[in-house]
Amino acid sequence: QCCRALVGEETRDDAFYIRRCVEIARKAIGCTTPNPMVGCVIVKDGQIVGEGFHPKAGQPHAEVFALRDAGELAENATAYVSLEPCNHYGRTPPCTEALINAKVKKVVVGMVDPNPIVASKGLDKLRGVGIDVTVGVEQELCKRLNEAYIHKMLTGNPFLTIRYSISLNGNILDRLGEGAVERGGYYSRLLQEYDGVVLSASSTANELSLPISQESGANQPLWIITATSPYQVLVPPVAAGQSDSRVIVFADKECSVESSQRGIETVVLDHINLNAILEYCKQQGLCSVLLDLRGTFSGLEKLVKEAMEHKMLQKIIVEVLPVWEGEVDAGSVAALKTMGRHIDLKNVQASSSDRSIVLEGYF
Ligand code: AOF
Ligand code: ZN
């Protein structure tokens, strides 16, 4: 028992509380765009006396909820925040003011906010009034939490991830692994996390509906359907119960798009290209986009080529299914060859079950 108590004490360092911030920040996964996910914990005499997270753009920031939760106990306490407190009037007032008014003694921050209107000004403000400030605790974890937000802030472009499922004999499969679209499955969680998903019409034509995220309270992504073959007729994928799904079709000009569902926006281009799609996503305020390859991903191979040539991809997620399946498909093999050059992925993570292995990494 003595040992357990010691271990308990030891783990409750700054890193412990920032990890807790990240954990509660993730409650708003997929809901905060264009804002980041942020969590805040108020600690006094080794006890958590307040917690909060940023639920949605336009609503109060994490610090405000945590300070409200702590009430008067915030005085002389330490505030832990996964992202630097803001110091500007946006949709909401500055969190630095809230922390100062609550008379916290110390602020521990996961990472500096890359937003140019914040960018260390929050830290400077707190230090300026004599608050003890520590920065960079569990920084990698905090960065990963908001990888899309950070990329968007630094480049102005949405964070782009490519995804596909592959068989043991190297074919890109039209389907996902068993359980992937169920609650807690990796694809269900991607639909919750990403603001937009690009899919080719050929891979939706045989499906009755697009999958929806099964995670509780999940926002559904904007579906971006590409239609490239002249003969292609798109069966609209929005089914009953998917009323909050939004769909836009990008069609090559010789392609006729038929839709039994009214109100589906169609953009006709001379030639579909990723740049135009991402530009649209940017205008719509999307922070993250998933390029989802299925089957022969007709038309998408051009987009993959463009993405590789212009280094537009940030992340890759590949699901390996324990099956030997399908004809060798010239389309998919040729498209992957365009990925020609040698690339070592960074920060690779793998998760496995008896149904599949999901590998992810960064370009
Ligand atoms: C924080 N805590 O929980 C969040 C922050 O329009 P606003 O007022 O919501 O401001 C948005 C900006 O505030 C956002 O771009 C980012 O720089 C910061 N987000 N800051 O101190 C939070 N969500
Ligand atoms: Zn704030």
Image: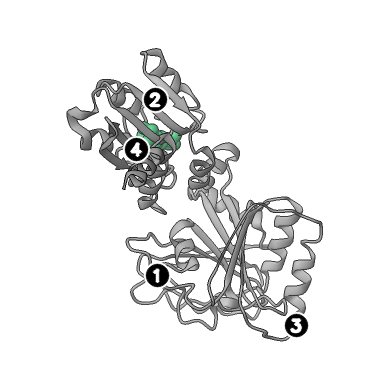
The answer to whether mark 2 is within 8 Å of ligand 2 is no
- Does 300 sit left or right of 215 as displayed? right
The answer to whether mark 4 is within 8 Å of ligand 1 is yes
N-term-proximal mark, 2 vs 4: 4
Question: Marks 3/1: CA distance?
Answer: 32 Å
Q: Which mark is residue 145?
A: none
- Name the residue that disc number 4 marks: 40
**Amino acid on which the number 3 mark rests in the picture:** Val
- Where residue 324 sits in the image (x, y, percent)? 67, 84
Whether residue 94 is visible to the viewer of this picture, yes or no, is no
N-term-proximal mark, 2 vs 3: 2
Question: Marks 4/1: CA distance?
Answer: 27 Å
Question: Marks 2/1: CA distance?
Answer: 38 Å
N-term-proximal mark, 3 vs 1: 1
Which numbered mark, 2 or 1, is in the foreground of this view? 1
Other residues around mark 4 within 10 Å, as few (<14) / some (14–19) / many (≥20) = many
N-term-proximal mark, 4 vs 1: 4
Question: Marks 2/3: CA distance?
Answer: 56 Å
Which numbered mark, 3 or 4, is in the foreground of this view? 4
**Amino acid on which the number 1 mark rests in the picture:** Arg
User: Residue farthest to the right?
Assistant: 341
The answer to whether mark 1 is within 8 Å of ligand 1 is no
Q: Residue at x 49, y 45 (%)?
A: 146
Q: Which mark is residue 328?
A: 3
- Name the residue that disc number 2 marks: 87
User: Which of the two residues, 308 or 4, is positioned nearer the viewer here?
Assistant: 4
Q: Secondary structure at mark 1?
A: loop
Q: Which mark is residue 183?
A: 1
